[in-house]
Amino acid sequence: MLRQSNQQKLLQKLSPQQIQLMKLLQIPTANLEERIKEELEDNPALEFELENNNPEQDNYELGEGSIDGDDGGGEGPGEEVELSNDTAEKVDLDDFLRREDDDSSGYDYSDDYYGGGGDEKQVTPARVETSFHDQLLDQLGMLELDERRHKIAEQIIGSLDEDGYLRREVTSIVDDLAFGQNVNTTVEEIAALVHDIQQFDPPGIAAVTLQECLVLQLKRMPDSKPVRDAIEVLDKYFNEFIKKHYDKIQKHLNLDNEDFKGVINIIIKLNPKPGAAYAVVNKAESYIIPDFFVFNNNGVPELSLNSKNAPELRVSEGYREMMKAYDRSEKKDKRQKEAVIFIKQKLDSAKWFIDAIKQRQHTLLHTMQAILDFQREFFITGDESDLKPMILKDIALMTMLDVSTVSRVANSKYVQTEYGTYKLKYFFSEALQTDSGEEVSTREVKMILNEFIGAENKHKPLSDEHLTDMLVEKGYNIARRTVAKYREQLNIPVARLRKEL
């Protein structure tokens, strides 16, 4: 038998405005401008602030009763509304409805909204970069191939990755040609064409493995005994070579120390990624735009927020005037009411977005100021040893924000100082206790570990056990496995792989 009952539950839910704020917090300054442009294109009631000469604008709130014709949200019918002179567009409600019939929202998508003028501008054509695959296709013309084999060769070149390797299985290329281009071929025919493409520049392309790539480059060098010995090392002792078991290789090849060192020098000068030389670097992605600036003013660090990509926004006067015109109008039909509901939604959305941008800037400054106060010594001296142990919870307690909010602020954000540009996550580290009971940052321990390894004898590199003993002698209570973990985090290989001849 079905039984019905009532239950009360207490749930926490984020409002759409809170979700929007959380998303904006995660966006770095470099991407904020694009996000604002997307909002401007989507919401015609939002526009750039040209000159803030309307004191009531920031306190503007939409009335709940204005849609139904009440006097709770708007001015009375007899009141005159004075608009500022910088209004971008005066929009009449009837005109809005007429444009709606013409399938036009009336929103101007021209460059004027982004600071452009009305005059035509001459656009300079972008410089075209020649890609790695284009270079190979140009060289393909030097082979005397019929149309069918030319298509197969093009498919092979298209299957090479950005490093120049043929990672795709040959059988899969056969299937691609059969189903995609209706070209029947065999594994043997593709292998023969791959061999031809391997003769193209740069040397080493179209290899399947790193070993094959390096051998192909050696075979293109002038013939000499060191080159032949290098080919033999890679052909027969590749695993021993990458693990630096040099004694075993030297014994098998019967080479003295000087000759073997010459062979190794030839191999290490080879290019493991021949296609990377033709890669097009995206300068926009590689260029870091700092979110904060910290200046040292006579020993007092001062913080400022980079607002370059956060322009002042405002609610459109034209769309606000339509709301007021509807309140003053004596004739309110259903069609006008539907249009005003749409306008109110856009006005609400514009105000929420403006508030979210302001809240974002306030949260960023508040959080960064707490980091600055916590790590004040570092921002004054720039010495890594002055960094204190700091976790997300420390900043959350100082700012009275949630740990997840602090994490969003610290993610993908940068601060520019007199000593360089740092990621905010750089200032967060755990604590390690010394013999004296003092807590130091693990970053300080990593810095000392890096100094030990940098000063070691490369012919007899320091083992993890030896590094542990050296750190303990300096007063750091640390285990060997912790030293190994920090070494891996610093991308430093084990002692055997750091050994040089």
Image (tube, helix red, strand yellow):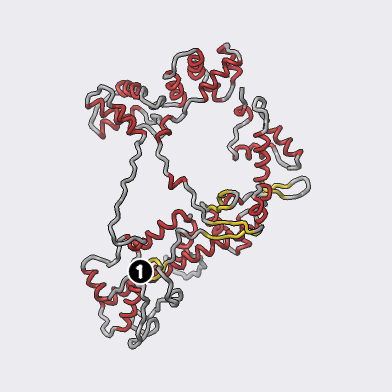
- The amino acid beneath tag 1 is Ala
- Estimate the x, y position of residue 110 in percent, counting from the top left: 30, 61
In the figure, residue 199 lies in which quadrant? top left
* Residue located beneath label 1 in the image: 45
In this rendering, the answer to whether 370 lies above or below 247 is below
Quadrant of the frame with the C terminus: top right
Q: Residue at x 47, y 28 (%)?
A: 272
Is 110 displayed left or right of 425 in the figure?
left
In this rendering, the answer to whether 444 lies above or below 57 is above
- Estimate the x, y position of residue 353 in percent, counting from the top left: 43, 66
In this rendering, the answer to whether 470 lies above or below 261 is below
Q: Residue at x 36, y 81 (%)?
A: 82
Is 385 displayed left or right of 185 in the figure?
right
Residue lying farthest to the right in this orientation: 436
Q: Secondary structure at mark 1?
A: loop
Front residue of 85 and 54: 85
In the figure, residue 220 lies in which quadrant? top left
Counting other residues with Cα less than 10 Å from the Cα at mark 1, is it few (<14), some (14-19), or many (20 or more)? many
Front residue of 300 and 43: 300
Is 68 displayed left or right of 9 in the figure?
left
**How many numbered circles does the render carry?**
1
